Image: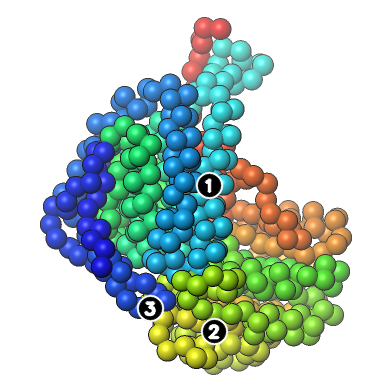
Amino acid sequence: MADKRKFYIDGAWVNPAKAHDLEVIDPATEDAIAVISLGDRADTDRAVAAAKAAFPAWSRTPPAERLAYAEKILAIYKRRAAEMAAAITDEMGAPQDMALAAQTGVGIYHIENFITAFKEFEFVRPLGPHAPTSMVSWEPIGVVGLITPWNWPMNQVTLKVLPAILAGNTAVLKPSEIAPLSSMLFAEIVHEAGVPKGVFNLVNGDGAGVGTQLSTHPDVEMISFTGSTRAGIAITKAAADSLKKVALELGGKGANLIFADADAKAVERGTRHCFYNSGQSCNAPTRMLVERSAYDAAVETAARVARETAVATGHQAGNHIGPVVSKVQWDKIQGLIQKGIDEGARLVAGGTGLPEGVNRGYFVRPTVFADVTNEMTVARQEIFGPVLSIIPFDTEEEAVAIANDTVYGLTNYVQSQNGERRNRLARQLRAGMIEMNGEALGRGSPFGGVKASGRAREGGVCGLEEFMDSKQISAWSV
Ligand code: NAD
């Protein structure tokens, strides 16, 4: 079992102040594969102190110098991509091809987009032609605490660490204690890139410990958090006394509105998207809303896709889905599938229990419920497993009402060949992102939601501004 008990603080791997061991479990085998330490207050204080000491010099480095470090991080990250993918497969179960192309690849995508945005970024710019000596200056915030989840580990780490340090902040990262190995490798990459000591620090720990210590720390000026809505609320409250800036990326319950004039692949695409990453994506289209005339065919297609979706260990090649991350998640998903059955949804594929022929690992059967109403638990709660709920609708107005009837507002989806309808719906749906007809959002488009999905905007130029304060200046000498 790998010994990963050190923290990366002030440019070096250091021993924890006290021993609090936690085993990292491979969800495909249920075996312990590594042991980490959960940090103590002394470890958090040490990391924050290192970041605080590094801030004055780092925040004054010329932008070109910080850009050069980001480019070095990118080059090393690309060189070590296979190692990164293996760490992600081990810690959270993503199948190896997907772990390399998507889980690791998305980190490359974000770093490249930040580099592009940063090259064009004007730190000091005029307010407008009406006030030529009034300037807006974009300034780093200070020491930032970064708290990340396990489901897309490098997606979240690159969306936070790169803009934080490019903006001139110094950072303390607390990755998920369930999937810390990829972040520890990321710390090695930052170290290899030669980023000055104290600029980036990593302390492992849980939410009650290091997570809360960062959220309440008087020397931490901002918390950027991705994870559950429950933890987002706890962090907001914990951060209130020290009036930190808090940026939250939380859960979702995405609606996918499929009209009778949708393209022929819409239902299959939506079902596969829901099951992708074993359903463990905050932007998963988990509520499929289908126009009545296309409904029966859609249910049939979704059930077929579920039956065709292979479930297997991430340690083998192929385009199957892997296990879910932990026993806790597996139990939660089983309970919600049972709840769907008990509340009267029609189970058309999958169900409770392990997939056929599997007797260990946290594998879930790809599951489809039809005839779901939006009041049922499976339509209201984020399940975070491969479980699709299909709901029929008769009119566009009804579809919008169902889609918006949720506490969440991260991503909604629309499938229709009618451009006027798409544009109308894009404005009416309450969410941070609207993806239509299977077309991805453009490079550098910010990721984020509204309502209980949190209101952070991560990625590209908006993601850089998220880690800065704007300062207003008069009588600028031009
Ligand atoms: P989680 O909230 O349990 O944990 C996320 C991180 O927060 C972990 O590092 C954890 O240790 C820490 N944490 C937990 N409680 C804390 C507290 N009280 N104070 C400080 N830190 C605390 O979530 P998870 O189970 O790891 O991740 C799944 C959740 O994340 C899902 O709800 C999912 O939708 C959400 N998510 C959202 C996005 C997004 O961008 N909107 C992206 C990925 C995941």
Q: CA distance from mark 1 to mark 2?
A: 31 Å
> N-terminal of the two: label 1 or label 2?
1
- Count the marks: how many? 3
* Badge number at residue 354: none
Instruction: Tell me: residue 304, above or below residue 112.
Output: below
> N-terminal of the two: label 1 or label 3?
3
| Nearest the eye: 102 or 343 | 102
| Nearest the eye: 369 or 89 | 89
Residue 338 shows in the view:
no
Q: Residues within 10 Å of mark 2 (few under 14, many from 20)?
A: many
Q: Find the residue positioned furthest to the left.
A: 18
Q: Residue at x 50, y 91 (%)?
A: 357
Residue type at tag 2: Arg
Residue 3 shows in the view:
yes
Q: Position of residue 428 (x, y in %)?
A: 72, 57
Q: Secondary structure at mark 1?
A: helix
* Badge number at residue 29: 3
Instruction: Tell me: residue 324, above or below residue 213.
Output: below
Instruction: Tell me: residue 383, above or below residue 55.
Output: below
97 left or right of 441? left
In this rendering, which labeled residue sits more in front, label 1 or label 2? Answer: 1
Instruction: Tell me: residue 32, above or below residue 347.
Output: above
442 left or right of 356? right
Q: Quadrant of residue 327?
A: bottom left
Which residue matches tag 2?
365
454 left or right of 254? left
Q: Secondary structure at mark 2?
A: loop
Q: Position of residue 198 (x, y in %)?
A: 28, 36
Residue type at tag 3: Thr
Q: Quadrant of residue 345?
A: bottom right
Which residue matches tag 1?
108
Residue type at tag 1: Ile
